[in-house]
Amino acid sequence: MKYFSTTLLALAIAVLLCWQLPWCYNFFFAKSGRPPFTLYSCVIGDFAMMEHQEGKGMTYRDASGRTYTQAEFDSILPMFYARQLMADERFPDTLNGVHITPRMVQTENFTFRTDPASVNTPVIGLYPLFETMSGRVELEQPEDVFRITDRGMEFMVMQTNRVDEEKSRLFTEAMQKKGFRFPALDIAGNPTVKKEYDEGYLLLDAEHRLYHLKQTKGRPFVRAVELPEGLRLEKLYITEFGNRKTLGFLIDSHHALYVLRSRTYEIVKTGIDSFNPRIDQLTIMGNMFDWTIRVTSADRTKCYAVRADDYSLIKTIEHKIERKRMPGLVFTSPSDKLVKPRFE
C-alpha cells in the first residue's frame, strides 16, 4: 500500500511538473511574434502595414518599405478610415474614378472571421429559423428550434419540448421535393436577431449537394444550388453582409475558397491558394473595390488582395510568425473549446 501511494504521488508530481513548468516559462519568458496589421490599399496599389515596434511606437509603412505618418496612412486606406477622414473633412469624393459617399462605405464594408475552434467544437444541433418576411423592421426570435436528422427536419417547441409534427412534415416534404438527402453534413447560419436581415441557412446534404433554406411567410423556401462539375464542398459559411451581394462562403475538399452570390446563386472561385478551416484562421475585410483575405496558420500569415467584383487575385504578401515556446502538458487549445489533456 505504501509503494502504491508513493508511486501515485510521484506520478501526480510528474504530471504537475509537465503542466506547470512549461506554463510558467511560457508566461514569463516566451514571446510570440505578431504579424503587422495588413490591408490592401487601392490608392497606392500595394499592401499597407501598421505595427508596434519597441522604441519606435506605432509605425506605418507599405510593402515596398515607404513610411507614412498616421494622417497619410489614413488617406491611403480611405475605405477603412472613412470616419476619421470625415471628421478631418478629408474624405474623398471619388476613388479610382468612382463617386463614393459615406453611406456607400457603410453599406459595402464588411468583416468576416472564423477560427478552428468554431469548426472543431461539437455543436448542440438545434437552430432557430427566423421569418424573413415578417413585415417588421427587426427580426423576432421564434418559439421553436429545428434539427435535421436522418429522418427529416424536426421543429421543437421550446416551451413544451415537443415536436411540431405539422411544421416538421411541411418542411421535410419541401426539402425532399428538391432532392435533399438526409441527414445534413453541414448547417451554416447566423442565429441572432442582431442583424439587418435573415437569409436562413445553407445546407450540405448527405451527398454533398448544396441547398438554401429559409422561412418566408411561414412557408418553406428551399433552393437546390447547382455546383460546378467536380466541386465537392466540405464547409459552408453564410454571410448576410449589408450590401446583400453575397450569400455565403464555401470551402471544397481541396481547401479552395468560393463565393456564393445572392440572387443568381453563382459560385465563383477566389484567387487564394488554400484555407483549411480546421487548422487555419480566416479574416476577410472587404470594401466596394477590393477584399483583403488573411489566412493565419501555425507559423505564418498570408494576405491576399482580391478584386471585389470577380474575386480574382491582385497581390499577396506573407508574414512569418516566430513562436518560441516550451512544449508541455496543456488542457486547452485555440483549435477547439474542449478541456482535455494534450501535449503541445
Image: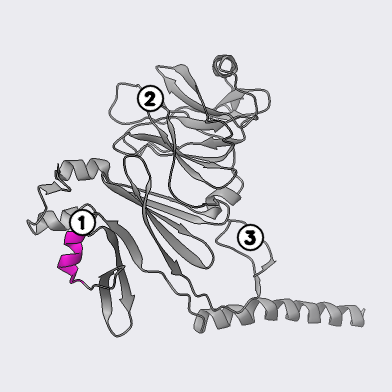
Q: Amino acid at mark 1?
A: Val
Q: Amino acid at mark 3?
A: Val
Residue that carries the numbered disc 2 in the rendered image? 132
Q: CA distance from mark 1 to mark 2?
A: 39 Å
Q: Position of residue 262 (x, y in %)?
A: 38, 30
Residue at image coords 37%, 43%? 311
Q: State which region is magenta.
A: 68-76
Q: Secondary structure at mark 3?
A: loop
Q: Is residue 115 magenta?
A: no
Q: Position of residue 327 (x, y in %)?
A: 63, 76
Q: Residue at x 59, y 36 (%)?
A: 232
Q: Could you tell me which quadrant the C terminus lies in?
A: bottom right
**Residue bearing mark 3:** 339
Quadrant location of residue 170?
top right
In the image, taking residue 94 as reference, residue 342 lies left or right, namely right
Query: Pointer 2: residues within 10 angstroms few (<14), some, or many (20+)?
Result: some
